[in-house]
Image (cartoon, rainbow, N blue to C red):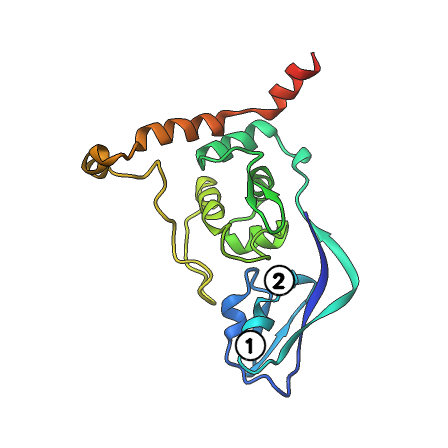
Amino acid sequence: MKHITLKAVVDEDKCIGCKMCEKVCPVNAISVVNKKAGFKDDHACRGCANCADRCPRHAITMVERDDPFDVGVDVSKFDYDQIRALCEKAHLNPEQVVCYCVGTRAEEVAAALLSGAKTPEEVSSMTGMRTGCTIECIQPLLRLVEAAGNKLHPNPKGYQWYGKTVTAWDIPEEVKKKYDSRGFYFDEDRKLLDQIVQIDARKLDEKEDK
């Protein structure tokens, strides 16, 4: 969950309609119409300041909201077995933090996807994920979006992501053989990561309670 306290405000006199703000908004909230940037709904803004930080004309500023609000997905409203299955398919533990800026866990992203989100931008809007640094969390987000059965397409408005990076589960056998004698232990790493994915903190808590 993220508490939204800021919003972006555009000074139309300074805006030149370059669309840089469109390209860097992680939730597709801002758009340029008639060569001026703006919001159809300022509640769509997640207060990340990407647009303000990158506007070449300093036409956008961040201001305090009069009506701060929370965004997030209630995991308890979903079948946790489905959540776990989706996270495991993406090679992530449900309780794993996948966005450190906001504190979003994989289970909340899975819940957003189960509720109908299909793109990284939609998940970010629902959970607040990727509205901090907007960088570190994109890879686990792409893995979860794809694990939910959605095709990954570049953001048509901008350049927020370029595709998935290779993980321990994607390394070709020829690469493993090539580097096996040089101190790399790909299969052992994958085995350990799989064990982490399988940890069920809820069951561990139940054992401790007993």
- Looking at this view, name the residue that lies furthest to the bottom: 13
Rounded to the nearest angstrom, the CA distance separating label 2 from label 1 is: 13 Å
Circle 2 residue: 48
Residue 113 seen in the current view: no
Q: Quadrant of the C terminus?
A: top right
Residue type, label 2 = Cys
Kindly indicate the quadrant of the structure image that contains residue 176.
Answer: top left
- Looking at this view, name the residue that lies furthest to the top: 210
Q: Residue 55 shows which numbered tag?
A: 1
Q: Nearer the viewer, residue 104 or 186?
A: 186
Upstream in the sequence, badge 2 or badge 1?
2
Compared across the picture, whether 98 is left or right of 178 comes to right
Residue 8 seen in the current view: yes
Residue type, label 1 = Cys
Query: Which residue is painted at 41% across and 51% down in the image?
Result: 152
- Looking at this view, name the residue that lies furthest to the right: 66
Mark 1 falls on what kind of element? loop
Kindly indicate the quadrant of the structure image that contains residue 53.
Answer: bottom right
